[in-house]
Amino acid sequence: MSMVLNKFDVKVSGIDISPGMIEKSKELLDGRADLKVGDSEHLPWNDRYFDIITCSASFHHYPSPELVLKEMKRVLRPGGILMITDPFTPNNLLRFFKYINKVQQGWRCENLFPKRNVWIARKVWVHAD
């Protein structure tokens, strides 16, 4: 996050279930990001709030990945980008991105860097939910 904040004029938000991790991140980022304690199945932001969502090396921890993906979709604006990187669960990520491609109309998913298991999902057209 600090690289993004140092290089670009953007608002950055983050969530972690661990209060200790949020406190450490707040210290490291010197209060420059909106960091919240919470769980990924109930994101504490309004619908269509984010232009870009990244999820890095945590997707394999989620007990209900389908619920997490639905929440990510809810808070991502139309035309936004969801990027998930998780080198620990290539088969699970592939299964869930196939699920997105099949069930979530209007989304296209692709593996940008197969050796590192970096996936990106884009809403390629807007439709009424």
Image (cartoon, rainbow, N blue to C red):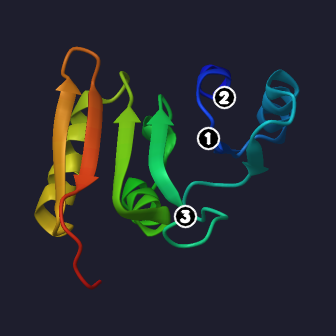
Q: Are marks 2 and 1 in contact (CB under 8 Å)?
A: yes
The kind of secondary structure element at disc 3 is: loop
Q: Tell me, yes or no, if residue 105 can be seen here.
A: yes
Q: Is residue 114 positioned above or below 89 on the image?
A: above
Callout 3 amino acid: Tyr
Q: Which residue is mark 3?
A: 49
Callout 1 amino acid: Val
Q: Earlier in the sequence, mark 3 or mark 2?
A: 2
The kind of secondary structure element at disc 1 is: loop
Give the label, 1 or 3, closer to the camera: 1
Q: CA distance from mark 3 to mark 2?
A: 18 Å
Label placed on residue 29: none
Give the label, 3 or 2, closer to the camera: 2
Callout 2 amino acid: Leu
Q: Which residue is mark 1?
A: 10
Q: Quadrant of the C terminus?
A: bottom left
Residue toward you, 63 or 43: 43
Q: CA distance from mark 1 to mark 3?
A: 13 Å
Q: Are marks 3 and 2 in contact (CB under 8 Å)?
A: no
What is the x, y in percent for residue 5?
66, 28
- Estimate how packed mark 2 is, as few (under 14), some (14 to 19) or many (20 or more) residues with alpha carbons within 10 Å: some
| Extreme-top residue of the structure | 115
Q: Earlier in the sequence, mark 2 or mark 1?
A: 2
Q: Earlier in the sequence, mark 1 or mark 3?
A: 1
Q: Residue at x 50, y 35 (%)?
A: 58
The kind of secondary structure element at disc 2 is: helix
Q: Residue at x 42, y 64 (%)?
A: 77
Q: Are marks 1 and 3 in contact (CB under 8 Å)?
A: no
